[in-house]
Image (cartoon, rainbow, N blue to C red):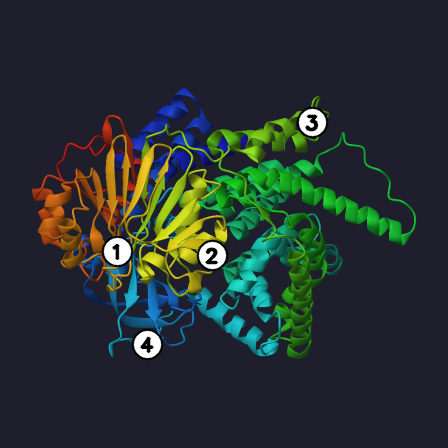
Amino acid sequence: MPCLAVIAVATAWLLQFFDTQWLLAWPAMAWCAGALLAWHCLGGRAALLVLLAGWTLCRAAWLIEDRLPGELAGRDLLVSGVVCDFPRPDAEALRLVFETGTDARSAGLPARLHLSWYAPAPELRPGERWQLLVRLKPPHGLANPGGFDFEQWLYQRGIGASGYVRASNLNRTLEAQVADCPVGSLRAALAGHIEAALAGRPGSAYVLGLTVGVTTGLSAADWELMRRTGTTHLLAISGFNIALVAAPFVLLVPWAVRAWPYLAGRPGVGPALALVVAALYSALAGFGVSVLRALLMLGVMAVLVWRRRPVDGFDALAAAALLVLAVDPPAVLAAGFWLSFVGVAWLLVAATRRSWPVAAPPPGPARRAMHAAAGLLRLQLLLGVGLAPLTLAYFQQLSLVAPLANLLAVPAFSFAIMPLALGGAALLLPLPALGTLLLRLAAAAVAALMELLVRLADGFAGDGAWQPPPSGAVGLGLCVVAAAMLAWWRPLPLRSLAVVLLLPVILGGNGSSDLQPGQLRVTVMDVGQGLAVLLRTANHALVYDAGPAYRMRDAGGSVVVPVLRTAGIRRLDALLVSHDDLDHAGGAAAVLRAHPEAVLIGGSTARLQPAWSRPCVAGEEWWWDGVRFRILNPPPGAWLSDNDGSCVLRVDSDGGGVLLPGDVQRRQEESLVARGLLAPVELLLAPHHGSRSSSGPALVAATRPRAVVFSTGYMNRWGFPAAVVRDRWERAGACTFNTAAAGALVFEFDRQGLHLVYAARRDGARLWTMPMPRASPCRLPGSA
């Protein structure tokens, strides 16, 4: 069964990770017929694989079909539905998932919406039914090589539209119905009782997360501490929580048999009772992937005990994986799925290391404690080695603090904090005084532990994380092989060669590109309503603008830095900030934190405080690897508006030139033309995102580019790019591209000219990706 589960899960992942929308047209009957044929020719296991593959694609087709139609986007819509999960507040808004139900589908609305309710937002609790005036858009996120994929996040959760709640008197609560998320209402009630018992004590937010899976009270600093110390998994309700809840009911069965002899000879009573209790607790915890995995494993084991068959951990884990796949095929795309199942698999491997010599525990309590601690550290290292490839693949870093932090945190959570928290939650209603005492003890214990972890993390340089240079699929494969060699439980010759396999991953490249002298690569990132461009030569890299800033995040940390890491850039030579508008300079601080070696050109040195900086002044130029960089604007000593004072950069390579004009307005464009500073180029970034106030006839006639890129936000409120501006460029013979529609764009200049080598929504498309519309008709190589 383990082999069957591995093949089934890998098939479901491949079918969804790549762009297989052409398979969605196959009807369900075709997959059923294929399963019958496979059963007849190859047996039942092959038929099960075909059925699971067909179910995965049918489920994907339903999710994609349940997206907001284009004609409803951007319109005010009055919807009614239920809040089933806890809303998540942040500095900008209240974020919630709104369940509209099947009634909304008849009106063309998706069954689930992701909404933002900006201040002032009322207090919402799970189980409440609301009528809301909303404005929606189809599932759409930023598309870049590297970084967070918001569209995948929506697809995994079955969300068909995102948007925000409009300020209106029509927003009101409705009378709740009996079937409106009863579990959500119960979770909210229990969370309210726990909050009242803890009364805001330090550690209360962690206790709520451990008991009912409510993590909305955790601050950004709390999450950052758990990330740095590698202890985020302890807060996730997982198999250990399920075991703590279920174990007492299994252990109490022998005493129950003495009281009720009828139970004798019925081995399935204890596991069945434990399964029922665990299922109730899993519902309260929100049925996460790790919770569902643990519950299904417990169910498989209960059935095996009831049927008086031997229980094998690997078979139970494989059956749980197949059941998760049958219940929720998109779950295989989540990092939590792989970390949960692979983590348990490594623990099962550790439990079967029969050939490893195990020393007898030494005499004396102190030595026994040290022996137990050494065994726990050995187990933690084994688990860390096994999960290292997945951690690098999903998060591009490893926590150096994690082994020591988990050596302290795992026993504390396992033997003190979690039993106290779960016991207090269970006793809070029948025995309020005792339940409150246990909950407060758990909060005090977790607060003390987190304070200790803060001191431990502060003892490491930087953020205590190691970020190796990207090594691609080959490097990930080497990590998997090396981890298996290091953790293999049987004698293995040349085990130490695993370290040699890791050398390419550890050392990486020298940061240089595959470009030759005179060649240039231009990456226009998808940062929403803003601008960020990476210019790269054979041995140098420059970032022009760093995207917008928001209240909780900025494009510098969420887009620019991941793009640089994915491109293998270990050293950034310069960051050029065209002007101080937030849609251009908002992410500059994050880029400089990640690359303090970069020279800041332009921008506010008082705000950014770079290690090296110089002003942006027309007339400055330099050469990198046979590529010429020239600053054309602003003139020395000129008094210009913020937009007209943008730092205009021209770069010339063997294959042609690129012009980056920032946000200059039409008057300054005409001034540059009059001074003879603008000449024809191959590629041009449309000034001011394609607004009517820029891209005047003088600029179009002087530059005559082959390609023009508009860096805009999807469905932005200004309507950029203006239709008249886009038409003006196209009438001049330019191919026009929009990052909101195409995602990130990568152009290359060589001796043959300009080429479009990558468009994120075309070349990096997944099953869930919003398709890239056809570009304007043009003859640019690579644009087809």
Q: Position of residue 231 (x, y in %)?
A: 61, 54
Tag on residue 252?
A: none
Q: Sequence order check: which comes first, mark 3 or mark 2? A: 3
User: Horizontally, is 772 left or right of 504 in the view?
Assistant: left
Label 4, label 3: how far apart the Cα atoms are = 65 Å
**Circle 4 SS class:** strand
Of tags 3 and 2, which is closer to the observer? 2
**What's under tag 4, amino acid-wise?**
Thr
The residue under label 2 is 610
Of tags 1 and 2, which is closer to the observer? 1
**What's under tag 2, amino acid-wise?**
Pro
Q: Sequence order check: which comes first, mark 1 or mark 2? A: 2
Q: Nearer the viewer, residue 275 or 357?
A: 357
Label 1, label 4: how far apart the Cα atoms are = 59 Å
Given the current orientation, which residue lies at the most extreme left position? 731
Question: Which quadrant would the N terminus be assigned to in this image?
Answer: top right
Q: Is residue 733 above or below residue 99?
A: above
**Circle 3 SS class:** loop
Q: Is residue 549 above or below residue 312?
A: below
Q: Sequence order check: which comes first, mark 1 or mark 3? A: 3
The residue under label 1 is 635
**What's under tag 3, amino acid-wise?**
Ser
